[in-house]
Amino acid sequence: MYDYLIVGAGLFGSVFAYEANKRGKKCLVIDKRNHIGGNIYTEEIESINVHKYGAHIFHTNDKKIWEYVNSFTEFNRYTNTPVANYKGEIYNLPFNMNTFNKLWGVITPIEAKKKIDEQKEESGIKEAKNLEEQAISLVGTDIYEKLIKGYTEKQWGRSAKELPAFIIKRLPVRFTYDNNYFNDKYQGIPVGGYTIIIEKMLKDIDVKLNVDYFGNKEEFDNLADKVVFTGMIDQFYNYKYGVLEYRSLQFETEIINQDNYQGNAVVNYTDRETPYTRIIEHKHFEFGTQDKTVITKEYPSEWKPGDEPYYPVNSDKNNELYKKYKELADKESNVIFGGRLGTYKYYDMHQVIGAALVTVKREFGE
């Protein structure tokens, strides 16, 4: 009946389905959730586009990817400028001259660099063996203790001393008074939310929601010549070599009867005692002027069966385990694996789109 069965109506699956459909291929997209869009799904609450599964800010240096997403909808000029709340003290992110001035009263880049270098020297760290040592060797002890340690340990559910150094190797540190979190040339939020993009991608494609692929795997596989699978690769192989580790998130969303709750779209809570990592105030993504506001608190948790897996834990142990699953995947002639879960890789949105388009070109010999 179909050329492709696409498991997962998220960004990777939707891009693949859209491109395959353009090439005359018949696709069926299925998803276990009751909506399309995967984790970038936005729903309207009180006339505000709520990012149901956490903040998603589109950013890229790739002009072709930027033009690609803009072909589906217009993007606004939103710039990601999160702030950190450490026990009631407010700091700018990423770490920049505003942060350093608040911490130490320094004014010039030379003063800030001197302060960081002094703390790095005092730490005595020659070669970073874990995340804590890596962070201190990059930004010193003050920034680490106030703005990295608690947030990171909540996010990963592990002591910073147990986490690998590579997680934080590219920590953004700027010696300018610039609060723009991303260095990318293109940045913004789709006007009207992300769901619009996925709706347009899947407009002429058969979609079935609230369906469990693994509940009827053989039946679904028989519907198409090939399968594009964007779920957990270890689940696909029935955890043959063991379970890969993922982090999950719990979201607590609340409508508040005031027009402005925190004055910023994203506020990170960097102390260890606050149970959530951040609060998102969704209206600020689109410069909203509604009378009410909607906030979401994010609580990280260890993934367990039945939870949603949001991102892989790319430790050495897990990466070695993934290699075994990838060896199986590479031998599949009728299954294509994609997305964060299918390739066990932390992707940003522009990277997911890029990977999907590369997969399309490879699949259709272009």
Image (cartoon, rainbow, N blue to C red):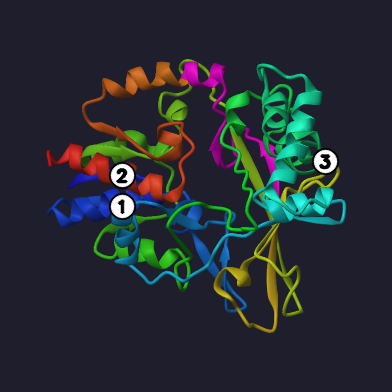
Q: What percent of the width, then of the height, locates residue 111?
A: 75, 45
- Establish if 148 lies above or below 123: below
Q: What percent of the width, then of the height, locates residue 6?
A: 31, 45
Q: The residue under label 3 is which amino acid type?
A: Arg
Of callouts 1 and 2, the N-terminal one? 1
Check if mark 1's residue and mark 2's residue have beta carbons within 8 Å.
Answer: yes
- Foreground label between 3 and 1: 3
Q: What percent of the width, then of the height, locates residue 160?
A: 73, 28
Q: Which residues are magenta?
A: 297-321
Alpha carbon distance from label 2 to label 3: 37 Å
Residue 236 inside the magenta-drawn segment? no
Q: Secondary structure at mark 1?
A: helix
- Foreground label between 2 and 3: 3
Residue 320 inside the magenta-drawn segment? yes
For disc 2, the marked residue is: 356
- Establish if 50 lies above or below 122: below
Q: Quadrant of residue 65?
A: bottom left
Q: The residue under label 1 is which amino acid type?
A: Val
For disc 1, the marked residue is: 15
Q: What percent of the width, then of the height, locates residue 84?
A: 74, 53
Residue positioned 75% across, 68% down in the render = 262
For disc 3, the marked residue is: 272
Q: The residue under label 2 is which amino acid type?
A: Ala
Alpha carbon distance from label 1 to label 2: 6 Å
